[in-house]
Amino acid sequence: MVREILVGCCGFPVKRERYFEVLRGVELQNTFYRLVKEESLKKLRESAPGAFISIKAPMGITHRWPSPVYRRAGYGKDSSYLSQLGAFRETEAVRSLTETLIKWLEAAGARAVLFQTPASFKQTEENLSRAVEYFRRFRERLRERGLKVIVAWEPRGWTPLFWDLLDALGVVLAGDPEEIGYPPGDVAYLRLHGRVAGRGYGREYAEEEIRRIIENLYSFKRANIFFNNVRMCNDAQKALKVLEEMGRQA
């Protein structure tokens, strides 16, 4: 039986003060798009004591340059530096960003980190090897710093062939259950995108659909559900309502 199910959104769809009055978990998105200051993360932690904060890892670790996501991202114009970014490569630029990420985790008091790779990061032997080596090094750095966080990865379009390997590394396979199902392991990290036919983020989740998703989480010890659709705040509150009703029924 799942011990804890946390519900939140990918980013803040409303003002933070109002958000944390209702929801106690959030996956930060600004950390992916730009290099934020540690001080701003410390202030967030202080403003929401006890909140479950997950940080989305910076694009410079996962996405190769050039990519549309780099527009206005603040990574500068030095092509020799930009060419080192992305794809979990063992470069000075990626190593430096990883150290920045670790400082962010400490500053925010984060309890999870989410790495999202693009569809262009195909399921090849080379890419899998890079990802595995990166996560091994990253896990070691976390141990050295005494950080205990959930490490999650959302690849795009990968098959289940490598899932057991990730589980052995202590990495949670994240994603939308409509696309990846419910991978093995003790922890579930769901990102509900609200896609229609694999596209967009416009679909709203019905309460019965949310109930079915939650029922599929009973085999995990812990589950994190982050809504990432246009109605994310409304749907997250529906999920809280469903959890309350299911608790009364138990």
Image (cartoon, grey):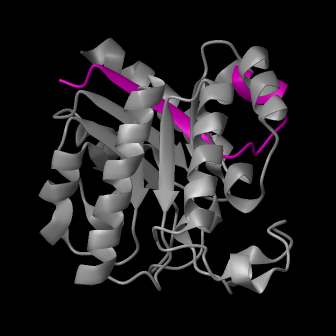
Q: Position of residue 104 (x, y in %)?
A: 66, 37
In-front residue for pair 27/96: 96
Q: Is residue 203 visible?
A: no
Q: Which residue is depicted at the point 71% across and 76% down?
A: 81
Q: Which residue is depicted at the point 67% across and 57% down?
A: 32
The region drawn magenta spans: 1-20
25 relative to 242 in the view: left or right: right
Q: Position of residue 227 (x, y in %)?
A: 55, 49
78 relative to 2 in the view: left or right: right
Question: Where, quadrant-wise, is the C terminus in this rendering?
Answer: top left
Task: Say whether residue 238 is magenta.
Answer: no
Q: Is residue 236 visible?
A: yes
Q: Which residue is depicted at the point 40% across and 56% down?
A: 153
Quadrant in the rendering for residue 42? top right
245 relative to 44 in the view: left or right: left
Q: Is residue 65 above or below residue 144?
A: below
